[in-house]
Amino acid sequence: MANLNNMEMASALSQHQHINIKKGFLGLSKTVIYTPTNAVVDLSVQEYTPDAESRLVQLLNAPADKLETEVRKGQLVSVPVGHLRLEIALSRDRHFLALQLFRFTNFSYSEITGPKFYEDQQADLVANIL
């Protein structure tokens, strides 16, 4: 599980209208909550090879009506160390999903896509292939 403070999309996630961030004891930990269902949001990071870039970009840029077509293309296979980094925030009830894709270049991560937010059926649909 990733730490919210170490995620590039932390500020975009905290500004989302349905997200509430609760600080733990002494402010040392933070819990992300999806407010419509009161579900805890788990944070993670997956890495991919450069071969997966076009598929990931197509998925993240797909309009709502084409999303199911992109998902039908099958599972995305992550690798332990890759040039692409996908930051993921998925609620435990699978009604909320936030994704942002980065590329590792010049010893840092540069943004490929902005943060993408999915809710309800779309969140569950996209989460099935991650």
Image: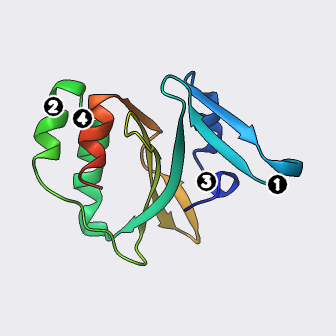
Which badge, 2 or 1, comes first in the chain's sequence? 1
Which badge, 3 or 4, comes first in the chain's sequence? 3
| Residue type pointed to by label 2 | Lys
Q: Are marks 2 and 4 in contact (CB under 8 Å)?
A: yes
Instruction: Report the disc number at residue 66.
Output: 2
**Who's the residue at 50% across and 67% down the image?**
105
| Residue type pointed to by label 1 | Leu
Q: CA distance from mark 2 to mark 4?
A: 6 Å
Decide: is 20 above or below 76: above
Q: CA distance from mark 2 to mark 1?
A: 41 Å
Which badge, 1 or 3, comes first in the chain's sequence? 3
Q: Are marks 3 and 4 in contact (CB under 8 Å)?
A: no
Instruction: Report the disc number at residue 7.
Output: 3
Q: Image quadrant for the C terminus?
A: bottom left
Residue 8 location, x and y as percent?
A: 60, 50
Left or right: 56 as drawn, with respect to 43: left
Q: As drawn, which residue projects farthest toward the right? A: 26
| Residue type pointed to by label 3 | Met
Q: CA distance from mark 3 to mark 4?
A: 23 Å
Q: CA distance from mark 3 to mark 2?
A: 28 Å
Which badge, 3 or 2, comes first in the chain's sequence? 3
Tag 1's secondary structure?
A: loop
| Frontmost residue, 10 versus 23 | 23
**Who's the residue at 23% across and 26% down the image?**
64
Count neighbours of disc 4 (C-alpha within 10 A) and say few if under 14, some if 14 to 19, many if 20 or more.
Answer: some
**Who's the residue at 53% across and 53% down the image?**
43
Q: Nearer the viewer, mark 2 or mark 1?
A: 1
Count neighbours of disc 3 (C-alpha within 10 A) and say few if under 14, some if 14 to 19, many if 20 or more.
Answer: some
| Residue type pointed to by label 4 | Ala
Instruction: Report the disc number at residue 28.
Output: 1
Tag 3's secondary structure?
A: loop
Q: As drawn, which residue projects farthest toward the bottom? A: 80
